[in-house]
Image (cartoon, rainbow, N blue to C red):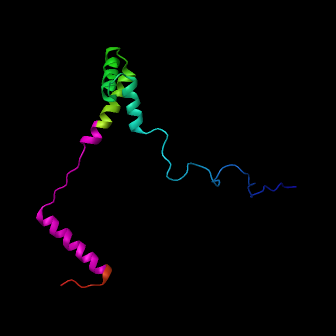
Amino acid sequence: MEKKQSTEKKKDNRGGARPGAGRPKGSRDKVSIGSLLDTIYTKSQGKDYEDLLVEDFLDARVSSDKQLLLKYHNLILNKIMNTLAKVEVTDSQDAIEAKQKAFAEALAKITGVKTD
C-alpha cells in the first residue's frame, strides 16, 4: 500500500501581515542621527564625533591593532570615496546633435508625427 503525501500545506497563524502590526504611519524613529550626535557631543565633554573618530583611529595605529585599523581605513575610505567620486560626462556638439536627432525620430515613431 502506497502512502500518499499531502500536497496541501497546513495553514497556521504564524507569519504574514497582521492588522495593526508595525509602526504607525508617520511615526519617527526613536533614535535620530542628530540626537545621537548631540548625545555623543555632550557625553564626550564637547568633542565632535569626527574628532573622536580620528582619536580612535590614531589609538588603533599606536596599539598596532591591524584588524581595527583595517576597519577604520574601510570606514574612512568609503566615506571619502562616496563624496569625492564624481563622474563628469561631456559631449561634443556632434554627439549632442546626434542624440537630439535620435530622440526626435524615436518620439516621431511613438506619436506618429512626421519629422520634416
Q: Is residue 116 magenta?
A: no
Q: Identify the main secondary structure in magenta.
A: helix
Relative to 2, is 50 on the left or the right?
Answer: left
| Above or below, 55 relative to 95 | above
User: Can you give x and y, in whole percent of width and height, for residue 10 in the image?
Assistant: 75, 54
| Above or below, 1 relative to 82 | below
User: Can you give x and y, in whole percent of width and height, for residue 24 in the image?
Assistant: 55, 51
Relative to 23, is 38 on the left or the right?
Answer: left
State which region is magenta: 80-109
Residue 69 vs residue 25, the one in the foreground: 25
User: Can you give x and y, in whole percent of width and height, for residue 42 in the image?
Assistant: 38, 26
Residue 74 vs residue 79, the one in the foreground: 79
Which residue corresponds to the image point at 32% horizontal and 28% vertical from the top-left? 48
User: Can you give x and y, in whole percent of width and height, for residue 35 in the image?
Assistant: 41, 36
Q: Quadrant of the C terminus?
A: bottom left
Which residue corresponds to the image point at 24% horizontal and 72% vertical from the top-left? 103
Q: Quadrant of the N terminus?
A: bottom right
